[in-house]
Amino acid sequence: MSATETQTTTVPDTGTQPAGTGPATAPENTWLTPGRLRHWGVNAAVFAGVLLVWWGITATGLIQPLFLPSPGSVLQAFADSSSCRPIAEGSARIVCGEQGYFLWEHLLASLQRIGMGVAGGVLIGVLLGFAMALIPTFGRLSEPYLNFLRSLPPLGYIGLLIVWFGIGDTSKVWLLFLAALPPIAMATIDGVRGIRADRLQAVQSLGASHIQVMRHVVLPASLPSILSGVRIATGFAWTTVVAAELNNGIPGIGGLAYLSGTQLQTPLTIACIIIVGLAAITLDFGIKWISQLLVPWQGKA
């Protein structure tokens, strides 16, 4: 063989394939990973520990039942508020729920008020945020008033809303709307102002119209911030539900919690507080899930 000839080497087949060319493997179950199971186990253990400490304090009588009822009393209050029962032992008169409504009806009434208030906050807050971010003069003139509204506690103007709209649901929805509006508007402003200028210039150089720029660049880029604002606003509005239902709040879970507290029905009050907390966690989880569906690219840039 001459020096100019090329030698070829035969590579034995080892049965391996280059990365990315082999058969697709089944995706792993991300819900049953050891880390997630360990996390659930720790949470369950902590919850059981809290219940045990609660039961131990009430069983030993360290705190009077009026101030801290036992877990069994709270569970019984939950059952009574969700069923029909005799008004007194041996009485033929039947009463259903609490204050004429089942517990789920109180919760549903509060959720409806929250839904209307936050929906109005999303509609007006997003439009206001876009206007303030895209029109600098309007933004400078409006921002002090938005900050003023954001700094007001709900109890500071609930009386004025009652004077304007009465003690019905209208004043409650307005209160929740005013609680949800500032976080959504400010999140929208931050989302729009945070868009990189080179992105806008790139699509404009390709001949995109103003509507196309808004639809394909501004809205998708600001959507993660808007959804974060909706999440914060929903949580803030939910914490305001008790203030919204202080007057004529029946049916309503906040109104029931307030009224049962004034009547020294502590087990029912704690049951309402637990329902309020669980509903808040569920709402927050739902908004996070919707956010993952609408903006799957968030955090992956």
Image: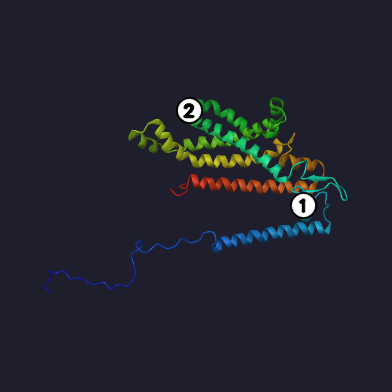
* Residue at the (51%, 48%) spot, across then down: 292
**At which x and y percent is residue 99?**
78, 41
In whole angstroms, how far apart are the C-alphas of marks 1 and 2?
54 Å
Q: Of the numbered discs in the image, which one, if any, rests on residue 74?
A: 1
**At which x and y percent is residue 156?**
70, 31
Outermost residue, front side: 92
**Quarter of the rendering containing residue 142:** top right
Nearest to the eye among marks 1 and 2: give it.
Answer: 1
Residue type indicated by callout 2: Pro
Camera-nearest residue between 103 and 9: 103
- State whether residue 152 appears in this view: no
**At which x and y percent is residue 244?**
70, 35
Q: Which residue is mark 2?
A: 136
Q: Quadrant of the N terminus?
A: bottom left
* Residue at the (78%, 45%) spot, across then down: 96
- Does 30 sit left or right of 248 as displayed? left
Query: For numbered disc 2, what is the local secondary structure?
Result: helix
